[in-house]
């Protein structure tokens, strides 16, 4: 039953009232299937007759004879005319049946027996055509109202949403959907608007559309009146199809001929409004395409960055055709963040993209296998060659006009030229950048002879240049088959060890050449330091031998280009020279400040360190040490043994103090230890520890005498290095005169 009961009743009542005999009193009423009164009215205004006592109240079930009349009509499903003894009124009712025979409503008439001289049963049977006329009038009016509302929309989607929502409101059963049709009348499932909300990621309308497959849609009633399909066309051009469909939970509901008639009427009258909206969308889309194409071409032509060109290509098409996916197949491997694929020429049967590249022309391929697929491949043409293929794909049935495929071809041609220009510019920029990097690196390395500073600079430079996840400098351990990590972009790896027989280092050691590795599809490279997909290694060669390796790696495959590989080789040459100079410089400095025999610092270096401490520390202590009877040792055992004893004592001193303390050879058999920020009691304990170790651990056994001097900035503000040593020397003299093998505090 179509429409709301009270609305349909208002149209039907108009025809009933026109057929009612003049000057006959009567009451016309409408109830729903449960007997509740929806509407009632007088048949002749002012002609009430003997019709009092009727229990007709809106939204309630009447009592008495009216109730019996309604119940009998609903049970028999036939026209009923009744009279009751003692009641002067005449009662009649017509059941309004659904398609499946159920009673949806009852139209009743109550009149006076005395004043109604016609056959009420025959009259009510004659009302059935009038009821149909009322329905037809309602359909015409509802359709006209829908079309008026549709003309307010110039967007196809807005128009369709308005259309299906109004149809659903009038039909009051199931859902209404609109699906776009191709030029040959096939449905395009992804362009569908529906009043049914999707549940659990699936929709009933999607399942219905799959049933139609590749067949052209025609007007049809399916599944025992549970699905109605009516296509909309304009001048024999298929536009959309309207589909009424009932959900599974409404198992006992069906559509009837009035629903079909209404949907057909709507489709016929809405076609012009829908065509105008589609045409408006096409005009806006074309204007948008031209504007976007102009902007895109301006961006591409003005761009000198390969990544910008690729990004504009990939993002422009989906903005116009959301149903299309875009892929770029290139013959070169650009340093770009936009995902690209390599063109393959190994297939037995060439793919669409390969054919477009080999033939140098746009190819459109449509496949209708298990799932319809449309593929468009356009070559990226430059003046010097073809650089790749722009391929757009839809895994659904789409209808692209010749104009739209031409648009993709123009975009690909322009992009090919821009890509070529960007590639050439990028290559020149890379060369300039590499020269600048090399000059900057050489300049910075020549300014420093500090090994740690050089290591940190080279590591930082590699990370900034190659933008890799891991950079490190490794040193080959002399006499051992291993490398130690000296510096790393990830500090936790500094100090770790890598065996020289691992694949990257094994190849570098064998060939003494730089190495570039990538292992796509076979998992990470076999390297124990950390997993990686791409790796570059450059040997650091000193005097023809490998002393270390510059290492750069990343988890991404094919991350490094050949240009990166050559640039790292140049880095290795400069880094190797700078590190060799720093090592030689450090060795020279060590030799200048170190006593050759004992390995302790020289007296001059000790004086400088003490002077610095006097300036910045609040207090400190100095121990002067003399080996007792050292001349006797030389005379008894010889000067070689004397030197060995001096070395033994020096080693014992070194092992008895902190790294921050300074031990030096003062002269001959005299040694000195300066303890910065150490008070006299602690210093006395250190001196006693040294004296005890010397007495117990030297061979031949010797003893030492120690003079201890301390200073404090709060007490002696003008203390000099000379005066501090003088105090310690006096204490040492006293220790030797007091019997030796003891510590005396100045």
Image: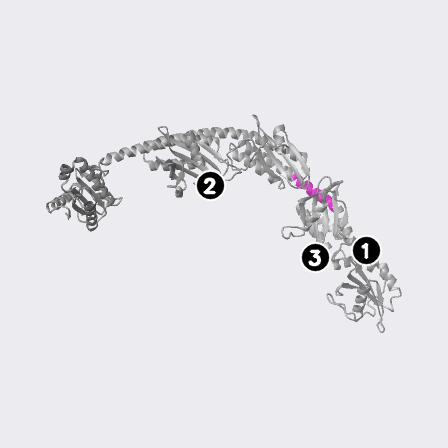
Query: Residue 730 occupies which quadrant of the picture?
Result: top left
Image side of residue 37 versus residue 567, left or right: right
In magenta stretch: residue 281:
yes
Residue bearing mark 3: 249
Position of 575 relative to 212 (above/below): above
| Label 2, label 1: how far apart the Cα atoms are | 80 Å
Q: Which label is found at residue 531? A: 2
Secondary structure beneath dot 1 equals helix
Residue at 37 percent of width and 41 percent of height:
495
Residue 267: x and y, percent?
75, 47
Residue bearing mark 1: 132
**Label 1 near label 2: C-beta < 8 Å?**
no
| Label 3, label 1: how far apart the Cα atoms are | 30 Å
The numbered mark, 2 or 1, whose residue comes first in the sequence reads 1
Position of 674 relative to 348 (above/below): below
For the residue pair 265 and 508, the one nearer the viewer reads as 508
Chain part drawn in magenta = 269-283
Whether residue 210 appears in this view of the structure is yes
Query: Residue 391 occupies which quadrant of the picture?
Result: top right
The numbered mark, 2 or 3, whose residue comes first in the sequence reads 3
**Label 1 near label 3: C-beta < 8 Å?**
no
Residue 289: x and y, percent?
62, 37
Query: Which quadrant of the figure contains the N terminus?
Result: bottom right
The numbered mark, 3 or 1, whose residue comes first in the sequence reads 1
């Amino acid at each position: 039953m179509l429409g709301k009961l009270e609305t349909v009743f208002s149209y039907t009542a108009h025809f009933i009232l026109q057929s009612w005999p003049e000057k006959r009193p009567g009451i016309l009423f409408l109830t729903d299937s449960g007997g509740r009164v929806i509407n009632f009215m007088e048949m002749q205004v002012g002609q009430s007759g003997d019709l009092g006592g009727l229990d007709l109240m809106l939204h309630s079930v009447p009592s008495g004879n009216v109730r019996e009349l309604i119940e009998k009509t609903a049970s028999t499903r036939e026209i009923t005319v009744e009279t009751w003894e003692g009641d002067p009124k005449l009662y009649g009712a017509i059941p309004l049946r659904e398609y499946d025979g159920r009673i949806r409503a009852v139209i009743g008439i109550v009149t006076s027996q005395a004043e109604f001289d016609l056959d009420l049963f025959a009259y009510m049977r004659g009302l059935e055509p009038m009821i149909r006329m009322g329905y037809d009038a309602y359909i015409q009016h509802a359709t006209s109202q829908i079309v008026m509302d549709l003309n307010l929309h110039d967007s196809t989607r807005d128009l369709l949403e308005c259309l299906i929502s109004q149809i659903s409101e009038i039909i009051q059963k199931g859902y209404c959907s609109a699906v776009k049709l191709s030029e040959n009348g096939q449905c395009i499932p992804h362009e569908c608007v529906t009043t049914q909300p999707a549940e659990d990621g699936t929709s009933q309308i999607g399942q219905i559309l799959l049933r139609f497959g590749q067949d052209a849609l025609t007007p049809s009633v399916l599944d025992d009146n549970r699905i109605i399909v009516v296509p909309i066309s304009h001048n024999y051009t298929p536009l959309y199809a309207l589909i009424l469909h009932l959900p599974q939970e409404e198992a006992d509901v069906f559509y009837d001929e009035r629903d079909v008639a209404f949907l057909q009427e709507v489709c016929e009258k809405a076609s012009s409004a829908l065509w105008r909206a589609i045409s408006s969308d096409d005009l806006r889309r074309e204007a948008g395409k031209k504007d976007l194409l102009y902007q895109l071409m301006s961006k591409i032509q003005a761009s000198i960055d390969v990544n910008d060109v690729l990004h504009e290509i990939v993002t422009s098409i989906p903005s116009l055709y959301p149903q299309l996916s875009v892929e770029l197949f290139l013959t070169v491997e650009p340093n770009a963040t936009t995902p690209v694929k390599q063109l393959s020429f190994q297939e037995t049967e060439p793919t669409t993209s390969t054919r477009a590249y080999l033939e140098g022309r746009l190819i459109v391929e449509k496949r209708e296998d298990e799932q319809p697929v449309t593929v468009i491949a356009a070559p990226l043409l430059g003046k010097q060659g073809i650089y790749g293929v722009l391929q757009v794909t839809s895994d659904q049935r789409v209808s692209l006009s010749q104009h739209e495929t031409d648009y993709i071809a123009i975009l690909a041609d322009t992009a090919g030229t821009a890509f070529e220009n960007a590639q050439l510019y990028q290559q020149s920029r890379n060369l300039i950048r590499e020269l600048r990097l090399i000059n900057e690196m050489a300049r910075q390395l020549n300014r420093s002879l500090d090994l740690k500073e050089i290591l940190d600079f080279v590591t930082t430079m590699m990370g900034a240049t190659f933008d890799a996840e891991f950079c490190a400098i490794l040193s080959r351990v002399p006499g051992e088959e291993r490398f130690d990590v000296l510096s790393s972009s990830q500090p936790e790896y500094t100090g770790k060890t890598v065996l020289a027989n691992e694949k990257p280092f094994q190849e570098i050691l064998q060939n003494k050449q730089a190495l570039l590795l990538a292992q796509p599809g076979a998992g990470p490279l076999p390297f124990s330091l950390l997993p990686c997909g791409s790796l570059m290694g450059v040997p650091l060669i000193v005097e023809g031998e490998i002393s270390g390796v510059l290492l750069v790696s990343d988890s991404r495959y094919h991350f490094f280009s050949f240009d990166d590989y050559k640039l790292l080789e140049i880095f290795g040459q400069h880094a190797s020279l700078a590190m060799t100079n720093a090592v030689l410089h450090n060795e020279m400095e060590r030799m200048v400040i170190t006593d050759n025999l004992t390995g302790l610092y020289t007296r001059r270096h000790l004086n400088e360190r003490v002077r610095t401490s006097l300036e910045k520390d609040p207090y400190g202590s100095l121990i002067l040490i003399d080996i007792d009877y050292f001349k006797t040792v030389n005379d008894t055992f010889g000067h070689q043994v004397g030197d060995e004893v001096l070395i033994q004592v020096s080693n014992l001193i070194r092992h008895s103090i902190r790294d921050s303390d300074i031990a030096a050879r003062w002269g001959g058999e005299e040694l000195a230890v300066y303890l910065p920020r150490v008070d006299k009691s602690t210093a006395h304990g250190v001196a006693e520890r040294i004296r005890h170790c010397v007495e117990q651990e030297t061979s031949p056994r010797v003893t030492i005498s120690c003079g201890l001097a301390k200073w404090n900035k709060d007490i002696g503000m003008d203390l000099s290095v000379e005066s501090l040593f003088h105090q310690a020397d006096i204490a040492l003299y006293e220790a030797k005169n007091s019997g030796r093998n003891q510590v005396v505090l100045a």
